[in-house]
Image (tube, coloured by chain):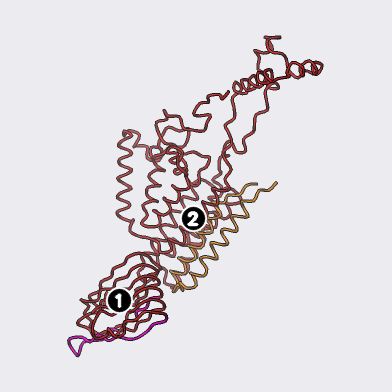
Chain colours: A orange, B red
Amino acid sequence: MTHDRAAFGFGVLAVALAALALWTAYGHVEWRLVGIAAPIVLVVAGIGILLLSRRHN
Amino acid sequence: MERPRSAALNGDVPENLPVISRPRDGAMVGGVCAGLARRWHLDPNLLRIAVVVLSIFGGLGLVAYGSALLLMPREGQAEMPVRRFLPFTRAWSTGTVVAVTIAAAVVTIAVVGSNGIGLGPVVVIFLIWFFGFRGRNQRTAPPPEPTPFERAAENWRQRLVEQQTPGYEASALASASEQRWTQPYTDPAADLAVRDDDLPAAVAPASARRPRRSWRLWWLALTLAGVSLAVVTVLAVVGVPTPPLAYTAAVLAGLGLTLLVAARRGRPPLLLPATLVMAAVTAGMMGSANHLAMPSMGEVHRTYTTGTQLPPEVTLSAGELTVDLTGLQLDADQNLVVHVGAGQLNLKVPDGVNTQVDWKVKFGEFNPTDVANSDQSQDGVDLSGSARYPASSANAPTLHVTASVDFGELDVTP
C-alpha cells in the first residue's frame, strides 16, 4: 500500500502553523520556544516521510 | 537497428498540442509545475521551489499558480478549467480569458500580496529538502504500454535478429524437434493473424493511471473544521477575546488533520490546495499583526517621529536595520529595545530628546560617530557600555534605548 507523502508533509506543516496561529490568537508567543520546536517539527515530518517512503514487499 | 518512435511513445508532448496541459502522473498539487516543466524540458522541482519561495515572500507564486491552475486544462482535456467554473467565459475568446485571468491575478497581488511570512527561510529549507528527497526517490515513469501492432512488430524483429545470428542454422536443426515458433512464410495464414499468446508479455506499468480519487474524506475535513470553529466560537461566547486569526487557524487545523489521515486513506481532490490557501491566509493574518516580533531578514529602515509611533521593540534576525529617530518628539519618557541578530544596526538618535543608549555587542564592533562618545568605539567580544546624547532643551523627556547586536556592527549617529 502506498502512502501519500505530500499529504503527510503538508499536513504536519498545516497543523503546526495552525497551532502557532492559535497560540498567537490567545496568548503571547515565545519565539525562543518556537525556534526550538520548529526544527523538531521539521525533523518529525522528515522522519515520517522517510518511513512512508519505504517500499513494502 | 534503432526504430523511430513517435513523440508520444517517447513520453514527449506532441508538438502540435495547442496548450500546456497538467498531467496526472508526477503532479504534486495540481500538476501546473509538472506540466510547465514537461513543456519547457525543466526539472519540475525547480519550478516548485520557485513557486513556494515566491508564495512565501509576497504571495506572487500562490497567485501565479492559481492563475495557471485556472488556465491549464488537465491532460487529455481541451477546455480550460476557468471556463468550467465560470460558464459565461465560454463565450469569450481564449485571449480574453487569459488576459482577464492575469489581470485578476495582478489585482489580487496588489491587494493582498504585501503580507509575508517571517518563518519563510525555515519553510523554504524544509521544502527544498522535501522535494529534493522526493526527486531522488521518485522512480522513472514506466514506458507507455505498446499497442498490439507494436508488440507484433517487436516479436517479428526479434525473430529476424535470431535468424541473423551466427550458428542459427545449426541450433535450429538441433532444436527442430522442439521448435518454439513457426518459420516465417511457411504458414502465411498463421502469420497474418496476431494472437495474444504469440505476443511477448506486455510490461505491466506500475501505475499507468491513478485511480479516481474519492471526495469522501472531505466530510471528515468539514467535520473537523466545524468542530474547531465551534470550540473557538464557544470561547468567544464565554468572553475570551477571540481575534479573526483564531477562526482561520481552527479551519486550518481541521484541514491539516484531514491531510494527515489522507496520507494513509488517500487524498481527496482539492484538499491540498484548500489547505495551502488557508495556510497562506492564516500566515498573512499572523504577519499583519504588528505586535508580533517575528524573525525577519533583509534591509529594513524604520523612522519614528512621535511617541505613539514608537514600538516597544524593533528586531531584525539578519541584515541591516536602520532606526531613524532624528525627528522624534516625545511628551514623556519612553523605552525602546532595538536588536539585530547578525548584521548591522544603524541608530540615529534624536536631537530634541535626551537619549540614553545602553548598548551591547556579543561579537563585532561598536562605533559611535559623535566626538563625545568616540572613546567608546571598540571591537571584540562581549562588548557593552552606555552613551548619553543630551537634548538641546534641558527639560526634554528621556528616551532609553537598549541596542544590541549579536554578530556585527552597531553604529550610533546623533
Q: Is residue B319 above or below residue B86?
A: below
Q: Is residue B174 above or below residue B243?
A: above
- Chain ID for label 2? B
State the residue position of label 2: B127
State the residue position of label 1: B411
**Side of B57 relative to A41 (left or right):** left
The kind of residue tagged 2 is Leu
**Figure quadrant of residue B360:** bottom left
Q: Nearer the viewer, residue B7 or B210?
A: B7
SS assignment for the magenta stretch, majority: strand
- Chain ID for label 1? B
**Side of B276 relative to B365 (left or right):** right
Q: Position of residue B121 (x, y in %)?
A: 44, 61
Circle 1 packing at 10 Å, graded few (<14), some (14-19), many (20+), is: some
Q: Element at badge 1?
A: strand
The kind of residue tagged 1 is Asp
- The stretch of residues the image draws in magenta is B381-405
Residue positioned most to the left: B393
In three-dimensional space, the C-alpha distance between marks 2 and 1, rounded to whole angstroms, equals 37 Å
Q: Is residue B109 above or below residue B214?
A: below
